[in-house]
Image (cartoon, rainbow, N blue to C red):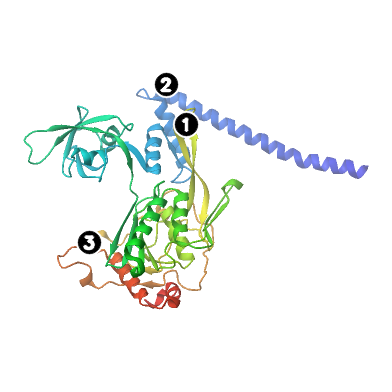
Amino acid sequence: MRKLVTGALMALMMALPVQADTQSDKDDFYEQLDLLMRIFERVRSEYVDEVDDKEVIEAAIQGMLRSLDPHSTYLNPEIYQQVRVQMEGEYGGLGIEVQMENGVVKVVSPIDDTPADKAGIQGGDFITHIDGEAVMGKTLTEAVKTMRGPVGSPIVVTVVRDGEEAPFDIEIIREKILVRSVRHRIEDETIGYIRITTFNMQTGEGVEKAIHEIVGELGSSLDGVILDLRNNPGGLLDEAIRVSDAFLDRGEIVSTRGRRRQNNNRWYATTGDMLDGVPIVVLTNAYSASASEIVAGALQDHRRAVVVGDKTFGKGTVQSEIRLGRAGDRAIRLTTARYFTPSGRSIQERGVEPDIQVLFPRRNANQGTAGPRREADLSGHIENDQEKLDLTGEEDIAAEVQIPEEELTDENGEPVDIQLKYAIKLLKDMSGLPKSQVAEARSATESE
């Protein structure tokens, strides 16, 4: 009995500090909240100019999230709508690629078979008014937002065109426009080229369609495929997984780990490689980030592709979109997990190192020695606490290619895409190898 009482007393004594600490934490928390509200009230009542309460509160929210890391952010209704358009890859609009020039909207080109194309909008046209309202004084974002709208709704744009004596109006009915994130073509007669500009809801389907068309056109003469992820800032995790799965027959694609169990996941490839083992080169640079790094890392770890170019950006974190408000028209984007390649690498800060480094030369002497900014250069970025993995016993970069000066420009003196040129040459060389040696060549790039 005495032992039981003594044990109970000891347990109570041990519990009391914990309860006290918990109560102290709560007191500190409420004190900080009270401090925040008192500062807000002082700003409202004593700042030199009258402030907009909504703007001040949004700034406070944004500041709180930005103090965590560069990728956690608040999306107000206007920004959230723009993000949804970008992620969904479709919107109600006209179908034109535009830029701002001399204060008005200049049409770079109409997208094929869109309302703008059917209505006769031409590249080089200037749009000066939208529904009678002058474009002058608006930003490009504001002008684009005005041109977008519900599918089936009409819009009148005033156009100035070279060769026409006066401006004229064109009425266009908005339709659903798909943001084209995937483009493909044939290079050097036997090489398939697939370019992904972003990972939105259309990307996986677009890549699968591109593969079908390339294989259908070239058949057994297909020597290889180039997957160009340069300047691709990323996007949807699900689409990165789908793209990776298109080229893999088995194995893990990516895993995520976070504080909460629901953020710990693994994704695996399904049976079937759409290229049936045809060699792949992945092109990357310092602006290939996030979802791009998932694809490059997965194909590299499985020895399914040779990564050529420059080290990637190094964004190895996952952001969850948490909707807020009764209407669900705003959200926060909060970093909730880190992702890892199949071999267990965390790419955060470090990026994906290319198997073969092919860099564009720094032609301007005034550029100095500073390279492009990556994740590690961002203020407040999450640090990589993983010890560097040495999975092969080799250096990170298996080979570094120096391009002769005479190959940097074509016969007209125009710059040559040396990374693409090298990728084509590499695939051509690999096509001459027996199939039994192709896999070995992927992992023995130091001989290049």
Q: Which is nearer the N-term, disc 2 or disc 3?
A: 2
- What amino acid is at disc 3? Asn
Q: Which amino acid type is marked by label 1?
A: Gly
Q: Give the residue drawn at x 50%, y 30%.
A: 36
Q: Left or right of 39: which side holds 113?
A: left
Q: Please report contact status of discs 2 and 3: CB closer than 8 Å, yes or no.
A: no
Labelled disc at residue 328? 1
* Residue extending farthest right: 1
Residue 24's place in the image compared with 346, above or below, is above
Q: Position of residue 119 (x, y in %)?
A: 20, 37
Q: Quadrant of residue 83?
A: top left
Residue 448 lies left or right of residue 35; in this view the side is left
Circle 2 sits on which residue? Answer: 45
Decide: few, some or many residues near mark 2? Use Cα within 10 Å; few <14, some 14-19, many ≥20. Answer: few
Asked which quadrant contains residue 149, the reply is: top left
State the residue at coordinates (54%, 30%).
33
The residue under label 3 is: 364
Q: Earlier in the sequence, mark 3 or mark 1?
A: 1
* Residue at mark 2 to residue at mark 3: CA–CA distance: 53 Å
Which label sits in the foreground, 1 or 2? 1
Front: mark 2 or 3: 3
Q: Nearer the viewer, residue 53 or 183?
A: 183
Amino acid found under the numbered disc labelled 2: Ser
Image spot of residue 24 (x, y percent): 65, 35
Q: Nearer the viewer, residue 336 or 158?
A: 158
The residue nearer to you, when weighing 408 against 187, is 187
Q: Nearer the viewer, mark 3 or mark 1?
A: 1
- Secondary structure under tag 1 reads loop
Residue ID at (49%, 35%): 323
Left or right of 335? Residue 28 is: right
Q: Residues within 10 Å of mark 3 (few under 14, many from 20)?
A: few
Give the secondary structure at mark 3: loop
